[in-house]
Amino acid sequence: MNKLDLEELLFEVEKPARYIGSEINSVKKSLDTIKIRYGFAFPDIYEVGMSHLGMHILYNILNENDEIFCERIFSPWIDMELALKEKNIPLFTLETHSPIGDLDFIGFTLQYELSYTNLLNILKLGHIPIRSKDRQERYPFIIAGGPCAYNPEPLADIVDIFVLGEAEEVIFEIIEKYKEWKERSATKKEFLEMIVDLDGVYIPSFYEVKYNDDNTIKEFVPKKESYPKEISKRIIKELDCVFYPKKVIVPFIDVVHDRAMVEIFRGCTRGCRFCQAGMLYRPIRERSIDKIKELAHELIKTTGYNELSLASLSTSDYSKINELIRYLIDEYGNKKIGLSLPSLRLDKFPLEVIEEIQKVRKTGLTFAPEAGSQRLRDVINKGITEKDLIETVKNAFSLGWNNVKLYFMIGLPTETYEDLDGIVDLAYKVVETFYSIPKEKRARGLNVTVSTSNFVPKGFTPFQWQPQDTIDVLKEKQEYLKSKFKHKNIKYNYHDTKTSFLEAVFARGDRRVGKVLIKAWENGCKFDGWRDHFQYEKWMEAFKESKVDPHFYANRKREYDEILPWDFINIGITKKFLIKENEKAKQEILTHDCRISCTGCGINQAFSGGVCNV
């Protein structure tokens, strides 16, 4: 696209900075000197995508290679989409404003099932056929990774290549094969044949699925005997040895997370039974404290951010968290650079950490008890108690905090209305705790925000066989909680039940829901994660037209012997372990943190090499 075209477009849109590129630390390369053009595509708007740590990692690691140019692609907002269509201009990359169809690869990250229609929309706006079988030789290869790729089947007709697991190594293995293939001028299928044996690579077109009369899966069959029957995820064994960006793009406009982020470890040892990430990203691997210090220094220097976030699934579980916090406060506190610890556990929230952080900048506190009663917290293996919460908030209130957010989930397996009452009781006890502190020792005013999300059963969790509550049941529970929260200090928020229902359909869907996805998108569905744009009726029409029952996927209990759509993927955690955990949930039995001793999940057998810390 020439400059004039872009300027014409920018006059017609609300936030031009979403589309112009050229931000600080963005990469510029000459198209004459590179061999591979890769588009990192985030199927949502710029402000959301620019806050994604994985984007910054892959963008920079690919651009470190002189032969590769990685550019960014985001979903255009409605105004830009309209302008592109009116002028018949294909969607373009941010770096060179080239049509995305000119790239060699377009790699999508799948963070959320409700972004799938945006993936289709990006392809269509790029004038690229959405089905892989319709994309002839001249079109880019479509790759997808991220947590949702662990159930790739709903997108099996659309995506050419799935990458399962951490991509820092395998993406270069794919690109190396691509360079070989390009020199041969062979067919696209021949390229896919060249990479089908790479660990972590899944080519859906090389497999077919057979079904039983009751619509369950009968068999997952490779079309050739040479194709792997099982696909193993990829992991990085040593985080200190793998690339991490020392500079990241600084947007011109506010984005969701405007801060520097250092990932301090991957994996989680806690074993919450609803948590997919906690299972997918095992084994736990820590970055050394010296490496974190180095990265923090570089990122602050190269971005100018005044906030540093320590990213992980459970930040307070980092083995040297106190030492790290003290160092960062000593080093950056006098420069007014604040610290953000986004994932803290109530049972490991040291007072020293609170005191240190508030010296620079005081922010609200967020905790996730997840369930209101101890019984249900034991069912989900949360491993925290009411005492943990009350003691923690008491300490926080004594130190001047007065904003607390509490996250819960409703619709969890075995949940009763007594468990819902537990949510209410807990919130009121937090309020009582605040007022139990002498006036002179606490801040003025109190805000307690209680948020409930809806349980969505996900693959590779102990609850993968459990049904989701119906929309009506979830709504009744939300109404019940609304009626109970009548306190001036407590605000109650809750997640939309219809989007949770659709999320459950696609989280456990097979290939047949792919045609529903396409139909819904053809009917106008996109930005489904945005409340104002979610069109539930159109989705239901799409299910009806496709003759697919969404309740079969969302609200049905699975038996242990049923073949699940993702059973051909090996994440290292055994099915035997997941079944054992599901049974322990029914008996309300806790499983301890595997840092204490091995719980036998299987990861240290599947991924040998000393990466498991147990």
Image: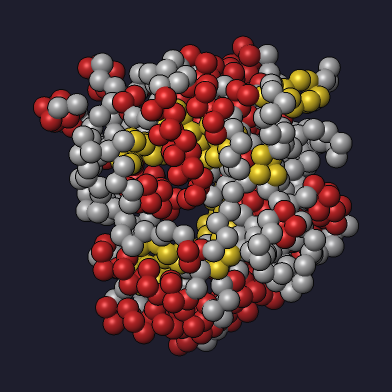
Where residue 111 appears, as percent x and y from the top left, is 51, 43
Q: Quadrant of residue 499?
A: top right
Furthest-front residue in view?
Answer: 184
Furthest-left residue in view?
Answer: 4
Where residue 155 appears, as percent x and y from the top left, is 57, 28
Residue drawn at point x = 57 percent, y = 60 percent: 237
Q: In the image shown, does 301 or 349 lie closer to the viewer?
A: 301
Residue 181: in sight, yes or no?
yes
Residue 435: in sight, yes or no?
no
Q: Is residue 119 above or below residue 340?
A: above
In this rendering, the count of numbered labels is: 0
Q: Quadrant of residue 331?
A: bottom left
Furthest-top residue in view?
Answer: 545
Q: Quadrant of the C terminus?
A: bottom right
Q: Is residue 554 above or below residue 168?
A: above
Q: In the image shown, does 426 or 94 lie closer to the viewer?
A: 94
Residue drawn at point x = 54 percent, y = 50 percent: 166
Color encoding of the figure? secondary structure
Q: Quadrant of residue 539?
A: top right
Residue drawn at point x = 29 percent, y = 22 percent: 90
Q: Is residue 302 left or right of residue 545?
A: left
Q: Quadrant of the N terminus?
A: top left
Residue drawn at point x = 29 percent, y = 18 percent: 85
Where residue 554 appears, as percent x and y from the top left, is 70, 33
